[in-house]
Image: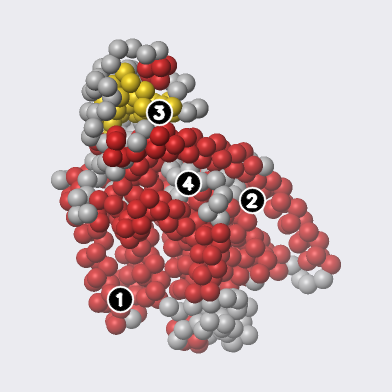
Amino acid sequence: MTTTTEGSGPEAPTTARRSGHPATSEVEGPVRATRPVPGRPVLVVAACVALAVASLPLPAALGYDPWAWLVWGREVARLSLDTTGGPSWKPLPVLVTTLVAPAGTAAPALWLVVARTAGLLALAGAARVAWRLAGPWAGALAAGFLVLTPDVEARFLRLVGEGHSAPLTAALVLWAWDRHLAGHHRTALLLGALLALDRPEAWPLLLAYGAWLGWREPRARPLLALVAVALPVLWFGADWWGSGRFLHGAEVAQVDAQDTDRLPTALSRAGESVTLVAWAGAAVCVALALRARDRALLAVAAGAVVWFAVVVAMSAVLGYAAIGRFHLPAAAVVCVLAAVGVVRGVRVVPAGRARRVVAALAAVVVVAGLVGRAAGLPELASDVRARAAVEADLDRALGDAGGPEALAGTCGRVVIDDPTIPRVAVAWKLDLPLHEVGTIRTPVAGPATAVVRTDGRVGRAYAAGPDGVVERARNARWAVYAVGCGDGA
């Protein structure tokens, strides 16, 4: 069996001997014969961090959840967590934002470094695993497939740009697979545990892997016990600390609990998570694995199916949102399977002219299958630039109005006429708990500090200069008013 350049660990040769395959066998699977992969993991991580830092000058506009995580990380660091007024609780990103909280106003940039590093690591992880299983062409294909996930708009790069944790979940599942392939099972378990701190869909899969590891490696049992204790404490204990209810996050996530016809939408989102050509390649991979009785690769494919099924069930039955990014860890696995299926499918054909023709046809089909989604990438980049400009104007308006010292608590409650991303961004920028930034649809009499869009209904009403309204700051997109506070001081 071919070993990797970093060392496959003691388990891989043993598995090869037990399977009865000679060292030159062409059988390829998650623990059996794998190809050498260039680059030690630590060097790959270092390169991804360097690229993420270098990318900071690019336009950036954090999403709703990342701003909330930054607020919560700051509160955890102050031992004053309040998880009300925001998205559902997730332990993993808040652990990270707690670490960057001491950086103050630089914390959002540090979180962006983490998020962009995670996105790059996801692409690198897809390439590494596919390369191990089928060579460099498969590695390149897997990364290409992944860029065009997890929906028809191919929002992977946007998720990275907005600082979402979804690319991080993809990176964790792919690197856990990579570490398992290398024989580092306890590292794979830890990466799976981190994944389970962000997505509850990982819990049944982590339980299955933990049971297998506990049976195979008794020395791993203390680590398994630690994981078993940490997960519920960080999920439910921390949410109880911040909200007073153990299941507060689960309740917040049930945004569609009254919609009883969500199954078609949930199934559609799962199907759209990867391109049709990727589904076809993954099907070829599974068919070849069945023929080769490659139980390890089939187990990975089954794990992806379980993930898709759990996300669909949680949406259709429990009312959780059917969002493409929730499928991203399973979609990342499908991307690897697809790349391996394309390359192995070509290799089934005898070497020579026939194989070259099949390879050319496969390349045409793959490119044709990807071009539709890839065509939308420039529009996504333009959207990120536009949102970054909106956020920059919000920063300027709050700064021109005096910042946290002049706005928070000096003129009633802070309110905003945009309940989406700007509301949680204002909470971070003015150093307020999320629930202390209210939303308004119509002008209020105050006392209040109102942050409003200049072209919105409330903004136009305040701009007319009614009694009791004092303008504190204004630019092209945002205005700040002191409402019902005398001179606005």
Residue 162: numbered disc: 4
Residue count near mark 4 (Cα–Cα under 10 Å), binned few <14, some 14–19, many ≥20: many
The reply to whether discs 3 and 1 touch (Cβ–Cβ < 8 Å) is no
Query: Which is more N-terminal, label 4 or label 2?
Result: 4
Circle 3: residue type = Ala
| Residue for badge 2 | 277
Residue 295 shows in this picture: no
Residue topped by disc 1: 214
Q: Is residue 91 visible?
A: yes
Mark in front: 3 vs 1: 3
Kindly check if marks 4 and 1 are in contact, taking CB atoms under 8 A apart as contact.
no
Query: Residue drawn 47% across and 21% down?
Result: 455
Percent of width and height locating residue 325? 46, 47
Give above or below for 193 relative to 264.
below
How many angstroms separate mark 3 from mark 2 (CA)?
A: 52 Å
Q: What is the three-letter code of the residue carrying label 4?
A: Glu
Image point (71%, 51%), residue name: 367
Closer to the chain start, of discs 4 and 1, is 4
Secondary structure beneath label 1: helix
- Label 3, secondary structure: give it: strand
Other-residue count near label 1 (Cα within 10 Å), few / some / many at <14 / 14–19 / ≥20: some
Image location (x, y in percent) of residue 164: 44, 49
Q: Where is the N terminus found, in terms of image quarters?
A: bottom right
In the picture of the structure, the residue carrying the numbered disc 3 is 473
Which corner quadrant of the image does residue 77 belong to?
bottom left
Query: Is disc 2 placed on a helix, strand or loop?
Result: helix
